Image (spheres, rainbow, N blue to C red):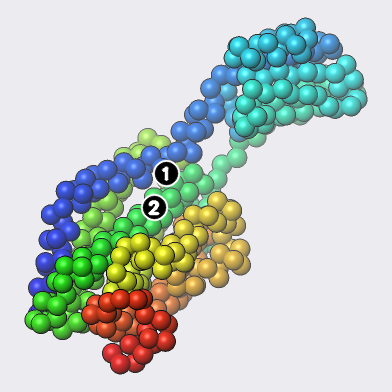
Amino acid sequence: MKAWIITKFELKRVVRKKWFIISTVLTPAFVILYASFPALLGKFSNRERKLGVIDPTGRIITNLEEKGGGKFQFPLKVRRLDSPQEGFSLLRKKELDAVLEVPEDIFSSRKATLYMRNVGDVALLSVLKERLNRVLQRDRLRRLGLKEEILKEILAGVKLQTLKVEKGKVKKETMESSFTLYMIFSLLLFMGLIGYGQILLRRVLEDKRFRVVEVLYSSARPMDIFAGKLLGVGMAGILQLLFWLMLALVGYFYASSFLPQFHLSGLMGKFVVFLLFFFAGFFLYSTIFLSVGSIVETEEEAQHLLGPIMMIITLPFALSFVLFMTPDNWIKVALAYFPYTAPFFMMMRAIMASPSALEIGLSLLLVFLTSVASVWVSAKIFRMGMLHSGAKPTISQLISWVKEG
C-alpha cells in the first residue's frame, strides 16, 4: 500500500512538469526528423551540379548529360573548357562544382582527372564514374561493329523490386521502410532508457541532498520506496511512450496510403516485440540508475560510474549501419542474446531478418531474468546506499550490502 502511495506521488511528480508535456510533443517531431534525415540528404544530393569538361577527344562531353540508371538522378549542366586554369578560376568563383579533365588517350588508358570544389560530394563522383564507364563501354562495343539500337538494348538498366520472404510467404517490404522503423524504435528505446533513468537518478540524489529519505524511511520500508520510485517514473514513461506509438501508427497509415515504399509486413507484431523489450529494458537499466544514485553524492560522480552503461546503450547506434545489412552476422546474433544489448539488436533482427518466435522469446526471457536479478540486487544496494554518505563504497562494501540486505 505504501509503495502504491509513493508510486502515485512519483508519477504526479513527473507528469506535472512542463518538460514532460514539451518533450511529449517535441520528441515525435525530433524522431521523425532524425529518421527521415537520409531521405532529406537524398533530395539534397539530387540538386543540379555544374561541371566543366576539358575534352580534346570531343567524344566524352556529349554523353555526360545523358541520365543513366544509377542511384543518383540529378541534372548535370556541362560546360566546355579550354584549360584547367580556366576551370580553377570558375571553381574559385563557385560557378562550377567540379572540373573533369579528359586525356586524349582515355579510351586506351581509361583514366581521367576530376577537380572538385567539394571532395565530399559522393553523389557527383558516383554519377561521373557511372557515366564515364558507360561512354567507354559504348565506344568499345561500337568499335566491335554493333549498331546504336543494339547498344541501347545492351546498356539498358534494370528496375529491381524488393520483396521480403517471411515464414515462407512473400511480403512487400522495402529496405527504406525497415530502416526507418528501426531508427524510430531504437530512438524511442534509447530516449526512454536514458531519459527516465536520469530522472530516477536525480530523484534519488534530491531525496538524499534534502534529507527526504530520512522522513521516508521513518514511514515506509526501503523496498516500498524503491518500488514506488521505479514504478512511478516507469508509468510516466509508459504513458508517454503509448502516446508516441499512437502518433507513429497514425503517421504510418497516413504515409502508407500514398507512399508504397513505406509498406511493412507484420507491423503489429513488431510493435509488440518493441513494447516487450522496452518494458524489460526499462527495469533492467532503471535499477542501475537507482543503485548508482543511492551510493553517490553528486550527479557528476554518478555520470562517471554510468560511463560504461552509456557506452553499452550507444553501441547499437555505432554498429547499426554496419550490421544492418547483415542481420544474421554472428556478432549481431550474440548481441541479440546479451541482456544489456538485446533490446536493440533483437529488435533490429525482428525487423530485418524475421527470427523465429523461439529466438525472440529466448532473448526476451534472458532480459527479463536479468531484470529480475537486477531489481533484487539493486533493492539491497538502495536500502543501504540511501543512508550512506561520504566516500563512494568499494566493491567489497557493495557485496556486503547485498548479503546484509
Q: Quadrant of residue 304?
A: bottom left
Q: Is residue 183 left or right of residue 164?
A: left
Count up the numbered dots. Answer: 2
Q: Which residue is mark 1?
A: 35
Q: Quadrant of residue 74?
A: top right
The quadrant the N terminus occupies is bottom left
Spatial CA span between label 1 and label 2: 9 Å
Residue 244 drawn above or below residue 99: below
Q: Who's the residue at 45% across and 38% down the image?
A: 37
Q: Which residue is mark 2?
A: 187
The quadrant the C terminus occupies is bottom left
Closer to us: 75 or 388: 388
Name the amino acid, label 1. Answer: Ala
Closer to us: 391 or 101: 391
Residue 169 visible to an observer of this rendering = no
Numbered circle sitting on residue 10: none
Q: Is residue 223 left or right of residue 84?
A: left
Name the amino acid, label 2. Answer: Leu
Q: Who's the residue at 68% across and 11% down the image?
A: 89
